[in-house]
Structures are given as C-alpha cells and as structure tokens.
Image (cartoon, rainbow, N blue to C red):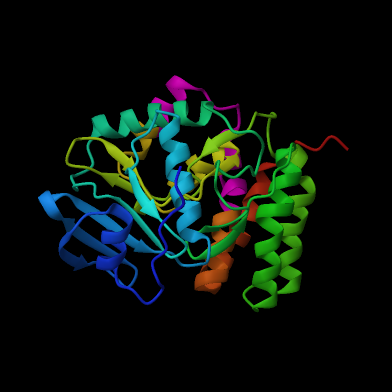
Amino acid sequence: MSEPIEVAPGDDPRAAAALLTGRRVIDERPLNATLSEVTLDGGHVVMVKRGDGPAAAQAEAAGLRWLAAAGMVRVPDVHGHDRHWLVTDHVPPGAPNPEAAARLGRELAALHASGAPAFGAPPPGGPVDAYIGLAPMRNTPGTDWPGWYAEHRVLPYLRHAVDDGMIRPAEAAVIERVCERLPELAGPAEPPARLHGDLWNGNVLWAADGHAWLIDPAAHGGHRETDLAMLRLFGCPHLDLVLDAYQETAPLAEGWTDRVGLHQLFPLLVHAVLFGRSYADQALMAARSAMEKGRGKRTD
C-alpha cells in the first residue's frame, strides 16, 4: 500500500478530496465544522472529514477497514486518508425498518464472532493512541477483560472526571468499588470480540438500500456486550428486533441484562469528561445499579 498523500492542515475539504481520491471536485456541501459532502467528477459523492486529533483519521480509516474485512457489516469504503483528513463513500439516507433492524442484529453477532487478537487490540494499521468521538482512547492489549476494562477504559476517564470536578472523590469511590468487583460482576469469560466501539444510534445509518450501515467506529478488541450496551444507551429504532436477532444468532450469557450498566460506564464517563455533570450522574447511577444487581454474586 502506498503512503497516504499529505494535505496541509489549512487546506479545505475540496482540496483534500481531490488529492486523496485523485479526482476533480465538482461541488461541496458543508454539513458541520468538520464534515462535508463532496461531489466528484462523474457524480460520485464522498464524505470528507477532518480528524479531531493527530491520529484520528488514521484510527477511523483502520477501524472501517477492519470492520469491512470481516465481511459481516456494511461500512463506507475508505478512499484515502492522511494525518488530517478522511475520505469515505457517502451512504444515501433512508429510514429505519424492521427487516433492516433484524438483519443488523445478525450482522453484529457475526462481526463480534470474527474476533480480535486481544482485548484492547487496535485494528491492523491503527494507532495505539486512538479516539472515541472527541476523546482520546488508548488501545493497550490485555488478556483479561475485567482487569483490562477497569485499567484502560473506566479508571482513566474516572480520574479525568474527578480532576475536572465533574465527579467528587467520595462519589468516585462507588465506581472504584465496581472496578474492584469486576471479576465477579463481568459474567462468564468470553474471547475478544471485534467491536465497532462507539455504537450509539448516531453511528447507525439507516440507508436508502434498506440496510443499516455503521460509521465513525472506535474499533478495537473488546467484550461483545459493550457494543450492545452502547446501542441501548441513547436509544435505537427497533432495538428489540436488533437484540432478538442477535440472541437468535449468538445467544448472550445468562444475566447479560444485569450487566448493561457495567458496560455503559465507559461511554458515560467519556461523555462526562466531554459534556459535563449530567453524564457523571448517569455514570454513578450505572455503577450503583451494577453493584445492586451484583449482590448475591459474591464468592467471599
């Protein structure tokens, strides 16, 4: 694979699209400060996105390619990237429908089953220092999910939230106790799954072709219940059909609904760091719920 062409940080999305695709730009429609819909010669439409950090475009491109390599879910093709820009195919929008939702459940089950080398493993070609949305996310591999999840997902963001004054030290103790009890709260051990990693409803595109497409991954090796807990966090059309189809394809371990809050701790703490106290309150509620539902699981 050839080295990506560099586009200067000051260049606009049109220049990035032209250089990274090698095609002439016909039109641009800005969607927000970092994303534009660009039309190339011949009428082909691409999305041009400026990365939020020094390796964000690289991380997202590697994640999309890793998800695509499994051959199980639909993701936009990557046309090119450099340190600042990512160019992918545009997915024509449609509307959610029950058939697409059930298909998404089956596809997610197959994606997760395609596996990863380790918990925290980055996609091939992806950086260790990656991102989840606007927040840094370090992909450090580990073999034990409870220990890895506590050390590399929950505790770093908890410390950040405490330092920023979003969570008081006395409140942080609740989440720290959850981390201490993770080995008994986490359910049966499972192999590392190939995760989208940031699977909230906004990253599921219900397309004109009648399928659900996944965008903006924070892909890594993780626990499959994490992706599903993220889908539940902010709601998803026909979520019951997604989960039913997933269960029919690859049943989840007994008690998985009791562990939803456990898996939502990480994204809620990320949101607390990025967006404030209301998400910290939700994280604390999730931690208390996990502790409450974990009563009776003690072995000591």
| Vertical relation: 268 (above or below) 213 | below
Q: Residue furthest right?
A: 300
At x 51% / y 45%, what residue is drawn?
A: 219
Locate residue 143 relative to residue 262 in the image: left or right.
right
Locate residue 17 relative to residue 255 in the image: left or right.
left
| Percent x, y of residue 124 | 55, 41
| Vertical relation: 3 (above or below) 225 | below
| Percent x, y of residue 1 | 46, 42
At x 60% / y 39%, what residue is drawn?
A: 221
| Percent x, y of residue 91 | 23, 46
| Percent x, y of residue 214 | 36, 43
Residue 282 in view in this figure:
no
Write the start and end of the magenta stretch as one range: 243-265
Q: Nearer the viewer, residue 106 or 139?
A: 139
Q: Please check the rendered image and state whether residue 99 is part of the magenta-colored stretch, yes or no.
A: no
Residue 9 in view in this figure:
yes
Locate residue 228 relative to residue 223 in the image: left or right.
left
